[in-house]
Amino acid sequence: MKKKTGFDRSTTLKWHPATRAVRGGTWRSEHGETSEALFLTSGYSYDSAEEVAARFAGEEQGMTYSRLQNPTVAMLEERIALMEGAEACRVQASGMAAMTTALLCQLSAGDHIVAAKAAFGSCRWLVDTLCPRFGIESTVVDGRDNDAWEKAIRPNTKVFFFETPANPTLDIVDMAHVCSLARAHGITSVVDNAFATAVLQRPLDFGADVVAYSATKLMEGQGRVLAGAVCGTKAFINDVLLPFQRNTGPNLSPFNAWVVMKGLETLDLRARRQSENALAVGKAIEGRVARILHPGLASHPQHDLAMHQMEACGPIFAFELPGGAAQAMRFLNALELVDISNNIGDARSLCCHPWTTTHYGVSPEVRLDMGVSEGLLRINIGLEDPRDVIADLEQALTKVGL
Ligand SMILES: *Cc1c(COP(=O)(O)O)cnc(C)c1O
């Protein structure tokens, strides 16, 4: 397989991010296809016994087995790394496979991890339940509190782990501060950037070491496949992450990699339009709900920090109804256009009740402590005309007496 001349890394790095998202990492076969080829193969054949031996010895480049490399998957990895401005990227079967790999590849019994308490439910499970089971100590802090990160550091602290904006409370972590604190203590910062993507926020520019993704969300963008990704330096990806990933096998299928790659071609457009739509919808309903947690609105306590770190607010925000879980569920049932769905990043507007869905797996005390109240709803604003989404939310608010 040959790469079109001129598509080497130094050329692609000169392109602007939107160009990298469309063109980066394209390798063309001898057929010269414009849309990237889908290599649905688990194995590879060789011209000679010496050739395969040389590949296994690392003396010759080339594919050997799709748990180790696959051309379609490799194209996606190169494209994501270019978009992120990272030296390297590896993709995994889901966002949770990416988070698990990013953490466990570098942690051992006796180490300590500090994580922000506002997080996707399964991310909290990794920190609260899985890590301690393997002798890895964990501490959760209020990610918005810069001093809390510093106070939590112990001699054996190896990793800082956080989302910004966080799912579903939209808490913002001051990346420049927290990541430089980590660096100063030899701690690796791992940032889950699912809510923003590289189009809206590039954590590496703020000193992050590792950026991890649920690519299922905005990156894929149309709610079709699960995928995850981890980006970092070549040394981290090749020497720390790859031995773990290749031997444990949380790989992304070539088909799913291909679907995500097609999604990336429209990511820049979608992320910006969905952010605009989310801001319009947030402004329209702000006065009718008990509380709105929307980084793009001046009412968000960390609005300035969010807009310093992000190019736009992203498609997701949360709001609280005063009548608790019963009213929140009646509101969901009253929606006509917006779907009741716990997915996000889709081109469709989707709304869910984290208390009974995405955060059901963490205890009620932990939910309340991270800001997930019974009346909280999380919404993903899609690519519909925002006037139709606003009309739907307004009629549902009216139906529940607000
Ligand atoms: C959805 C999500 C995940 C998990 O990703 P999957 O692709 O569903 O496994 C992790 N972190 C955040 C912030 C998410 O929104």
Image: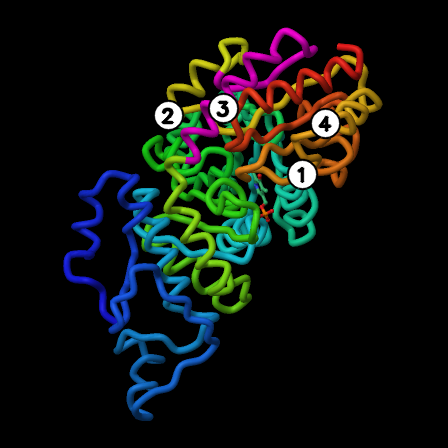
- Element class at badge 2: loop
Q: Is tag 1's residue or tag 2's residue first in the polypeptide sequence?
A: 2
Give the distance between the C-alpha atoms of the residues marked 3 and 2, in whole angstroms: 15 Å
Of badges 3 and 2, nearer the viewer stands: 3
Q: x and y percent of residue 172 in the render?
A: 51, 24
Q: x and y percent of residue 116 in the render?
A: 57, 31
Ligand 1 quarter of the rendering? top right
The main secondary structure of the magenta stretch is helix
Query: Residue under circle 3?
Result: 277
Give the distance between the C-alpha atoms of the residues marked 1 and 3, in whole angstroms: 19 Å
Q: Is tag 4's residue or tag 2's residue first in the polypeptide sequence?
A: 2
Asked whether residue 369 appears in the rendered view, the answer is: no
Query: Residue under circle 1?
Result: 342
Residue at image coords 37%, 37%: 268
Q: Is tag 3's residue or tag 2's residue first in the polypeptide sequence?
A: 3
Beta carbon of the mark 2 residue lies under 8 A of ligand 1: no
- Element class at badge 4: loop
Of badges 4 and 2, nearer the viewer stands: 4
Give the distance between the C-alpha atoms of the residues marked 1 and 2, in whole angstroms: 25 Å
Residue at image coords 15%, 61%: 5
- Element class at badge 1: loop
